[in-house]
Image: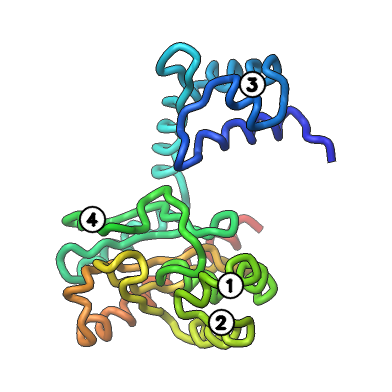
Amino acid sequence: MKENSQERLLRLLSLFADEEKGEWSVDEASVHLGISASQTYRYFRTLASAGYISAYTTGRYVLGPAIIELDRKLRIGDPMIHAARSIMREMLSTAPSASIAILCRYFRGQVMCVHEEFETYQHHEISYERGQPRPLYQGAASKVILANLPLRQARAYFNHAPDKFNQFGLGANWTEVKRSLRELRSQPAIITAGELGTSASGISAPIYDDKRVLGSVSLVLPITVATEEVTSFLMPVVAAAGQEMTRKMQHLAQLQQ
């Protein structure tokens, strides 16, 4: 199917989301996208005039201030974030110090943290940093979403990365993975330890609207304090937070009908 100009413009903008390369010239983008330099220049000019990209030196562009403006509006206006704030703060109040409450969305076959609540920020060597996509097979916040996807979707993700599914304890073949996912889905909340680096443990519960899994709500705590007593206390707390978020999102979905 022939690509239209809007699709090419979006594909150009998505180049700037690359973790490895955040700056582009017209010539580089032209080669990468497989379109003429003159077309690419027009797209650069369109995005730059709207503030979505900005020249930081002659001929080289990075994401522009309009992206920051949109991010602020997202944090203020996203109904899911708005619904989660008080729930996450209450959940965090029951957790050990240096814990972090995170809200994640299912996003294009990955999981993305869209909001954090914390009293004292604890940096982990690998984390669900806000805005950074994470795979579905790694960590509690991701696995609880994976477990609640339709099996057809989950199998497609397994087929794409079977070694990773096995590495993170989900199974060496589809039969084992399917069994693991059903077991995870039967639990109101799940826990993992040391999957995102070695310093953190995560407890997560799914969030639904009226039809599908939207994301997850989680507590991330230092693994040094994640004793059986602590996690046994926090599991129902996180499960209750997921259930309350689901009630709120279902209510919002019904209001739109």
Q: How many residues crowd around disc 4 within 10 Å: few (fewer than 14), some, or many (20 or more)? A: few
Q: Which-is-in-front pick, marks 4 and 2? A: 2
Amino acid on which disc 3 is placed: Tyr
- Rounded to the nearest angstrom, the CA distance separating label 4 from label 1 is 30 Å
| Picture layout, residue 117 above or below residue 163 | above
Seen as rendered, the residue at the extreme top is 58
- At 63% from the left and 87% from the top, the residue drawn is 175
- Rounded to the nearest angstrom, the CA distance separating label 3 from label 1 is 38 Å
Q: Tell me, yes or no, whether the two marked residues, 3 and 2, touch with CB atoms within 8 Å.
A: no
> Which of the two discs, 3 and 2, labels the residue nearer the N terminus?
3
Question: Label 4: which residue?
Answer: 123
- At 39% from the left and 72% from the top, the residue drawn is 204
Q: Quadrant of the C terminus?
A: bottom right
Question: Label 3: which residue?
Answer: 43
Q: Is residue 56 left or right of residue 42?
A: left
Secondary structure at numbered mark 1? helix
Secondary structure at numbered mark 4? loop
Amino acid on which disc 4 is placed: His
Q: Is residue 51 left or right of residue 193?
A: right
The quadrant holding residue 181 is bottom right
